[in-house]
Amino acid sequence: MAQQVRGVVAPGRGEPVRIETITIPDPGPGEAVVRIQACGVCHTDLHYREGGINDEFPFLLGHEAAGVVETVGEGVTGVAPGDFVVLNWRAVCGQCRACLRGRPWYCFDTHNAARKMTLSDGTELSPALGIGAFADKTLVAAGQCTKVDPEAKPAAAGLLGCGVMAGLGAALNTGAVGRGDSVAVIGCGGVGAAAVLGARLAGAARIIAVDLDERKLAAAASLGATHTVHAGAAGTDVVAAVQELTGGFGADVVIDAVGRPETYKQAFYARDLAGTVVLVGVPTPEMRLELPLLDVFGRGGSLKSSWYGDCLPSRDFPMLIDLYLQGRLDLDAFVSETIPLDGVEAAFEKMHHGDVLRSVVEF
Ligand SMILES: NC(=O)c1ccc[n+]([C@@H]2O[C@H](COP(=O)([O-])OP(=O)(O)OC[C@H]3O[C@@H](n4cnc5c(N)ncnc54)[C@H](O)[C@@H]3O)[C@@H](O)[C@H]2O)c1
Ligand SMILES: [Zn+2]
Ligand SMILES: [Zn+2]
């Protein structure tokens, strides 16, 4: 039986979000309905609201979520009603050329639910990142549900569903930070702060946090940054500052968690010869990058992009939740505040002013 629940909908480009009654169909084959317990507010939700992702309004926002599986459709074997799950936007297909080569974290054909959630007048909703979890319940492909230890707090666990995983994975998976490495992270919001945590988990010896906001630098320091650089301070040259903190050479891995041409250039030049740049911040379509090609060649190393931290949810989520429960991965530090479902618009405002790492809607 289809059900009516509350959901946060972005009705049109730049318009404030509002709570609507939405209809959740029964799960089709390979699908699951999940009762949401917590869902973080991510920059990408705001990008959707502003029309920065695509024009497929109305959107059902929210995608960093944890909850409990309520019902499953035909043929679902991976999860069952009652399972505590973190939702992901990488339900791998197992059949595309990336999956067949044994690199499912690059899967080019990830699954979402085929059935549609709608407004009460029947208008189809586009769920953010195929999830749509600022809602009492949502419909997803069963592969989007990753079972984790139910001891974890939903508000913290859900954050693995997007930004925090993106940052952790930028360091652990894409950047392949190793024991003793030096790492610089440019931009220490939710994603960059998680990259700092990932670098620490990987055993980096020196972790340099760079941001324009003192509050973000303080948070990064408490998560394990060994040095901080205030990029906006008068006379600060980020590249020179990182070099100075790394014996004059630059860092082994530099993670750009802002995603602008100027921060990318800083990352490019703040890395040591043969080092790695990881771009995890998302640029906008009009941005252009110009670099001397001879420098790209001459400095060697690798320039990588990180989508979702190159994570494989089935491999990474349960392991990271275990580390969290052992006190080795402070996911709680990212939960700046918990808010009700009608607090999403205000949370966008706080995010815009840099007041929070994450606001998390609790149900
Ligand atoms: N690649 C992925 O899979 C993925 C996943 C989630 C989010 N993201 C992207 O990551 C980026 C960061 O997300 P977030 O949630 O941390 O955002 P955020 O707004 O919380 O953090 C951005 C931080 O960058 C700082 N900053 C801005 N300009 C700077 C500059 N010139 N120099 C230094 N610091 C600067 C800000 O002060 C802020 O602390 C966004 O672009 C977001 O869309 C990517
Ligand atoms: Zn695939
Ligand atoms: Zn996100």
Image (cartoon, helix red, strand yellow):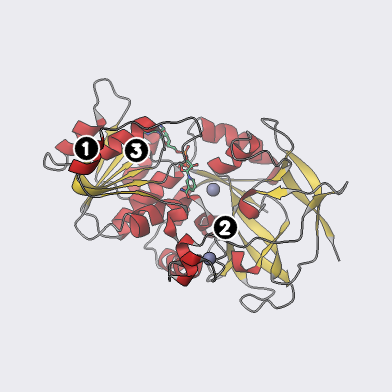
10 Å neighbourhood of mark 3: few (<14), some, or many (≥20)?
many
Q: CA distance from mark 3 to mark 2?
A: 29 Å
User: Which residue is under mark 1?
Assistant: 295
Count the marks: how many? 3
Which quadrant is the C terminus positioned in? bottom right
Identify which residue, 147 or 224, lies in the foreground: 147
Please, what secondary structure does the residue beneath circle 1 have? helix
Q: CA distance from mark 2 to mark 1?
A: 36 Å
Q: Residue at the location (59% across, 36% down)?
A: 52
Q: Which mark is residue 89?
A: 2
Would you say 52 lies left or right of 250 here? right
Q: Which mark is residue 217?
A: 3
Q: Is residue 263 above or below residue 323?
A: above
Q: Is residue 59 above or below residue 108?
A: above
Q: Is residue 144 above or below residue 213?
A: below
> How far across and how far down the image is residue 203, in percent?
25, 59
Q: Amino acid at mark 3?
A: Leu
Q: Quadrant of residue 296?
A: top left
The tag earlier along the polypeptide, 3 or 2, is: 2
> How far across and how far down the image is residue 91, in percent?
57, 64
Please, what secondary structure does the residue beneath circle 2 have? loop
The tag earlier along the polypeptide, 3 or 1, is: 3
Contact between marks 2 and 1 (CB within 8 A): the answer is: no
The answer, for residue 212, to whether it is visible in the render is no
Question: Quick one: which residue is furthest to the top in this view?
Answer: 234
Q: Quadrant of residue 243?
A: top left
Label 1 CB-ligand 1 distance < 8 A:
no
